[in-house]
Amino acid sequence: MPAFLYVKPIRCCFYGDISSKGDPESYLNSLFLLYNYFVEKYRCPGSEVLPLIVNTPGWVKGTGFDMLVEMLRYICPTIVVPIRTRMQRKNLPDGMFWLTGGETEPKVITIDAASRDSLSKSSLKWKDGGGMRERRLVEYFKQCFSSDISLATNKELAYALASLPPYEVSFSDVTVMHLHCEVSCLSCQLCSGT
């Protein structure tokens, strides 16, 4: 497994969906919360500035593009590295498209993506988002076990997870929040047990 799958986050947010389209505002609020934590914890006056790398999931159109613009305006990056493909519709606009005027201009380093023609088939492995998410999830769940346990297959991991006692949370500690609809007072009372 690649090293990036073993990284343990210092701070993280659970968004609860595979796409940011469902609730872009909550997604951005989570991102801003993480960024604010980074600034508070690691950007101290008089000390060396630690780099922050934000890897966006290829947002180039629609809601994703709008979210990218909001994120860039909030974070005010010093360096932006767009990776361009030969398919123009999959590229971001040229230049500093998110600036509205008066902001400090970041350095933009444009990189052309490797093409199939320039690489041998043996050195080129195409990664898909679903596979990457699955591998991250598998590595996350492997943390439940000591490193001396062999969990080479997903089936072994599934059996090992099924053998663990379930994590219990008191019902009184549960808060239900509906993001896309209103909850009637009766439903709230039923959930709270009153």
Image (tube, rainbow, N blue to C red):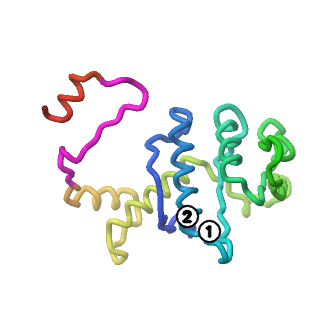
Amino acid at dot 2: Glu
Amino acid at dot 1: Arg
Query: Mark 1 sits on what residue?
Result: 43
**Coordinates of residue 88 in the picture (x, y in percent):** 84, 38
> Is 184 in front, or is 166?
184
Q: Secondary structure at mark 1?
A: loop
Q: Residue at x 64, y 33 (%)?
A: 63
Q: Is residue 113 magenta?
A: no
Spatial distance from mark 1 to mark 2, Cα to Cα?
6 Å
| 10 over 14 or under it: above or below | below
**Coordinates of residue 174 in the picture (x, y in percent):** 25, 44
Q: Residue at x 49, y 57 (%)?
A: 135
- Give the quarter of the image for residue 153: bottom left
- Res. 124 in view: yes
Q: Residue at x 54, y 47 (%)?
A: 130
Q: Is residue 176 magenta?
A: yes
Q: Secondary structure at mark 2?
A: helix
Query: Mark 2 sits on what residue?
Result: 40
Magenta segment's dominant SS is loop
Mark 2: few, some, or many residues within 10 Å (few <14, many ≥20)? Answer: few
Bounds of the magenta span? Answer: 168-183
**Coordinates of residue 143 in the picture (x, y in percent):** 37, 67
